[in-house]
Amino acid sequence: MRNQQGMVLFFSLIVLLIMTVIGVAVAMNATQSLRMSQAGSDRVKANIALQGALNTVVMNNEGSTLANLDDPQVIIDAAYNVTSTLTPLYDGDVACARSSRPTAGIECRKIELSSEITFGRGNLAQLTRVSGLEQEVLAD
């Protein structure tokens, strides 16, 4: 009987060690899941901010600003932390792409709108969206 008293302690320590390893593994898995969900949340927020900045740039520059754009124009939106660049694609006017029945005397200025935002831990992630715009103008 006396030889068996140490065996209970030995098996108890083995079970305690196994439970500790399982607990540490579960805690690490939970931490990793939280980091992944935070990264996904940051990306969604950045995407929404980028879309808001794109809409703001288009609304603030439609009409004569886009029609008279000759050189690239950089716009920094501090509210969304987004940098947008308006770049004319052609020298002069071209036919409008979306007109099924083009109106005589109306042509389009084509402009590329590129917006960029950095986000995430240490601002290491970057999201860029490039869109094309057409501004109708009177033909020369």
Image (cartoon, rainbow, N blue to C red):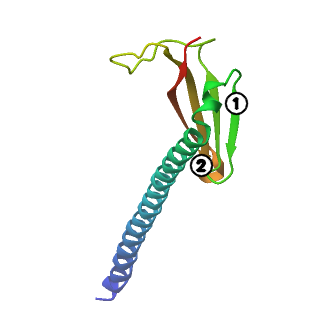
User: Which tag is nearer the camera, tag 1 or tag 2?
Assistant: 1
- Which residue does the numbered mark 1 point to in the structure image? 73
Tag count: 2
Q: Which mark is residue 1?
A: none
Work out which residue is located at the far front of the displayed protein and give it. 104
Q: Secondary structure at mark 2?
A: strand
Q: Position of residue 99 (x, y in %)?
A: 37, 20
Q: Position of residue 81 (x, y in %)?
A: 65, 49
Q: Secondary structure at mark 1?
A: strand
Q: Amino acid at mark 2?
A: Phe
- Which residue does the numbered mark 2 point to in the structure image? 119
**Would residue 64 be found to the left or right of residue 45 on screen?**
right
Q: Residues within 10 Å of mark 2 (few under 14, many from 20)?
A: some
- Rounded to the nearest angstrom, the CA distance separating label 1 from label 2 is 23 Å
Q: Position of residue 117 (x, y in %)?
A: 60, 43
Image quadrant of residue 64?
top right
Work out which residue is located at the far left of the displayed protein and give it. 1
- Which part of the image, by quadrant, shows the C terminus? top right
Residue 87 versus residue 117: which sits nearer the camera? Answer: 87
